[in-house]
Image (cartoon, helix red, strand yellow):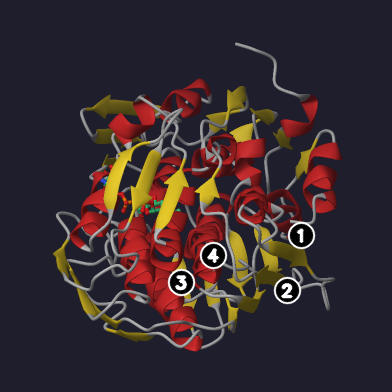
Amino acid sequence: MPEPSPCSQVVVRPSGPLRGVVRAGGAKNSALKLMAACLLAEGRFVLRNVPRITDVGLMAEVLRAMGAEVVRQEPSGPDDPGDLVVTVPAALEPVAPMSLVAKMRASIVVLGPLLARCGWAVVGMPGGDDFGERPIDLHLEGLAAMGARFETAEGGGVAGTVPGRRLQGTTIRLAYPSHTVTDNLLMAATLAEGTTVIENAAREPEVQDLAAFLEAMGAEVRGAGTSRVVVRGARALRGASHRVVPDRVVTATFLAAVGMAGGEVRVADGRLAHMEMLVRKLRAMGLEVEGDAEGIWAAGRRRLRSVDVSTLPYPGVATDYKPFIVAMLSVAEGVGIVTENLFSGRFRYVEELRRMGADVRIEGHHAVVRGVPRLQGARVRATDLRAGAALVLAGLVAEGQTVVLDAQHVDRGYDDLVGKLRSLGAPVWREHPEGELAVAEAGW
Ligand code: EPU
């Protein structure tokens, strides 16, 4: 195992009950798409509540490579990350460099806006495995139905052109309600000729957030948040402002933390309506959860009980919650079965949890989790963003010290997870704070 850089470690000690108020901040999976949507028009865009995470920094690099200017304004207060101001010129270079795209799959969402705006685009793609495990076929099929033609670009990736330069509205029925495919097609449709209907569309709150931004830009979108989205194409859109919807996965992280460590926590910007199925499961596990117009309150007063959970597209329990659910079940009373229905590789962190004494068995796409009273601190590795956060949570209920290596993955999607948990009383810190400084200094 290669030694990670010291700045990417999070150290966790056993925690008492958590108490206090935190904010989730803006949703990564909305902010990245809103940034891509800016490419649809010349003008100035102001995005509020964009989290200070490294994926936003990468998307900013992608936009800059095409000629846009992206600037983070000074925060106006402790709860404000500072507005992100994106200025898009009349002429774009619609080429997303492989070096950037390879670091973040979500950059595929620039393809739709670029084809719609420029009539051609080249988007580098990490090769082999990524195409296999998380293919982009539905993105390409949908855009092809709107008239785009694709070939393999030099050096890998896809090169797309639109004969006649303007995409054509049509009816697209998705084989699967993919989140980013819906985003990509929705954005492309706003500049297409005629009406586009996306059937079996993803219904995530972030899709609705994107539609609201597109409408502020002058687009006509109906049905976002339902399985049938209808878009009437416009000749041109304009600059706009928007506040990013709160992050439901970050909110879930804090709810899971209070479930495991106990205590009473309020997520000041949590939206219960965006996570009802998860909250139902959390309540069945014995966590008290209440939501109001302003946030979500949760209290953990006893050891959690096991439940069975299956991940499903929204409004089902999201695959992104699964590492927290497995972490919770690993210290709950009884046996719980977690079934993954979306991403095959999303059980890799289980091996790390086992190093901490968790009793988890993988059978196909099911994880069978037999709760133990307490985990053991260990040196574990964050295999991805959500897994890294789940390991930090596991450390809160482990004897001794837990060190989460490769914690830079966590920075991809969490704006200061460590600081926020510490503000709730959790004994967690960066062993070398240069990592956090690097993120802050980069302006994200
Ligand atoms: N799929 C295809 N072909 C495609 C696209 C997707 O077969 O062209 C399949 C995938 O292989 C997968 C399923 O469809 O089996 C679901 O993928 P989906 O496209 O819905 O996921 P995504 O849009 O790539 C987004 C989030 C993920 C989140 C999933 C599921 C973004 C940037 N990413 O991914 O978030 O897990 O939806 O809700 O929005 C994360 O935040 O860490 C993260 C991975």
Residue that label 2 marks: 83
Q: Quadrant of residue 146?
A: bottom left
Local SS, label 1: helix
**Viewport quadrant of the C terminus:** bottom right
Residue that label 3 marks: 289
Q: Amino acid at mark 2?
A: Asp
Of the numbered discs in the image, which one, if any, rests on residue 27?
4
Labels 2 & 1 near each other (Cβ < 8 A): no
Toward the top, the furthest residue is: 1
Q: Residues within 10 Å of mark 4 (few under 14, many from 20)?
A: many
Q: Can you tell me whether the CB of the residue at mark 3 lies under 8 Å from the nearest atom of ligand 1? A: no
The answer to whether residue 234 is left or right of residue 381 is left
Foreground disc of the pair 2, 1: 2
Foreground disc of the pair 4, 2: 2
Labels 1 & 3 near each other (Cβ < 8 A): no
| Disc with the residue nearer the chain's start (4 vs 2) | 4
| Disc with the residue nearer the chain's start (1 vs 4) | 4
Cα gap from disc 3 to disc 4, whole angstroms: 21 Å
Labels 3 & 2 near each other (Cβ < 8 A): no
Of the numbered discs in the image, which one, if any, rests on residue 423?
1
The answer to whether residue 377 is left or right of residue 342 is right
Q: Nearer the viewer, residue 117 or 229?
A: 117
